[in-house]
Image (cartoon, rainbow, N blue to C red):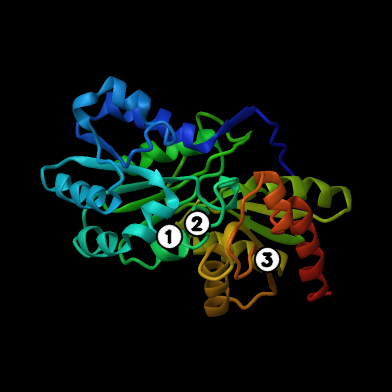
Amino acid sequence: MTTNYPILGENDTRSGFGDGLLELGHENQNVVALCADLTESLKMTKFQAAYPDRFYNTGVAEANMIGIAAGLTIGGKIPFTGTFANFSTGRVYDQLRQSVAYSGKNVKVCASHAGITLGEDGATHQILEDIGLMKMLPGFTVIVPCDYNQTKIATKAIAQHEGPVYLRFGRPKVPIFTPANQVFEIGKAQILTSGTDVTIIACGHLVWQALEAGRFLAEQGISAEIINMHTIKPLDKVAILQSAAKTKCVVTAEEHQQNGGLGDSVAQTLALHQPTPMEMIAVNDKFGESGKPNDLMIKYGLTAANIIEAVKKVRQRIS
């Protein structure tokens, strides 16, 4: 069975974070926000205007921001930190490891402009290693929502979750295709379409590409089961294994390095429990570069066409 997902509109996922954060401000007085001089880019201006006494601009001092956030949790606050993904992870990894993960602090690390769809700022800002960095930290939950609506709901969900969270989202406007009133459960994958011939597991911006691929494959008589794996950690292993047992082959798709990303986590699950032919759509050991987001997605092989090619390749291994 294939479920149709029409485009409901377009918006960037970072706006979903900003709007979710504002609603959290209304609902929970313990929610506070910190930003490293990127308030407009992170869409945190609405929260700042509504709750100036609960907003802290730390300046271009990301390590300090993480340390302050960790300290705020001691008084019962729920801090949401905001900056670009590169500065939320790679630049402050020691603070994340020691002050947040090791100390078990309830900090929500919210990161925009992830992956190559950051675009023109180029390789120094286009972190493609952040999922790997963050999923390796003991106790960290890692979430990569797929559109505006899901990012908004995920932002609110992580406030209810006790423990450190990494929430990854992006800069460009992308299709909105999940419902505004959806149920979002941390650690529970979403089966977007059911199928019998191949399993496609995607996260973030690649979920829409997976759906586009699924529509084309259906026209070719190939039934694709498409899974939105919005939570990278804890991974929904049951969903993976049940689907792989049915389809006998898997393709993963993500805007991240192949090493250390979603594909690695899925491969580990399959290797340990149910060895299954698999292909990965991801960046293969390269840095990004300056360019238009869509052009970069094509150059780095992160499109529906690449997913279709991987599906045909993996299916040859079981025929």
User: In the image, is residue 309 above or below residue 278?
Assistant: above
Q: What separation in Å lies between label 3 and label 1 (alpha carbons)?
A: 19 Å
User: In the image, is residue 177 above or below residue 65?
Assistant: above
Q: What separation in Å lies between label 2 and label 3 (alpha carbons)?
A: 32 Å
- What amino acid is at disc 1? Lys
User: In the image, is residue 220 above or below residue 28?
Assistant: below
Q: Can residue 194 be seen at all in this image of the molecule?
A: no
Residue 61: % across, % down:
27, 48
Residue 226: % across, % down:
67, 52
Crowd band around label 2 with a 10 angstrom C-alpha radius: few (<14), some (14–19), many (20+)? few
Residues 248 and 234: in front is 234
Crowd band around label 3 with a 10 angstrom C-alpha radius: few (<14), some (14–19), many (20+)? many
Residue drawn at x 68%, y 60% as measured from the top left = 199
- What amino acid is at disc 3? Val
- What amino acid is at disc 2? Thr
- The residue beneath circle 2 is 124
- The residue beneath circle 3 is 250
- The residue beneath circle 1 is 233
Q: Secondary structure at mark 2?
A: loop
Q: Quadrant of residue 310?
A: bottom right
Quadrant where the image shows the C terminus: bottom right
Among numbered discs 2 and 3, the one appearing first in the sequence:
2
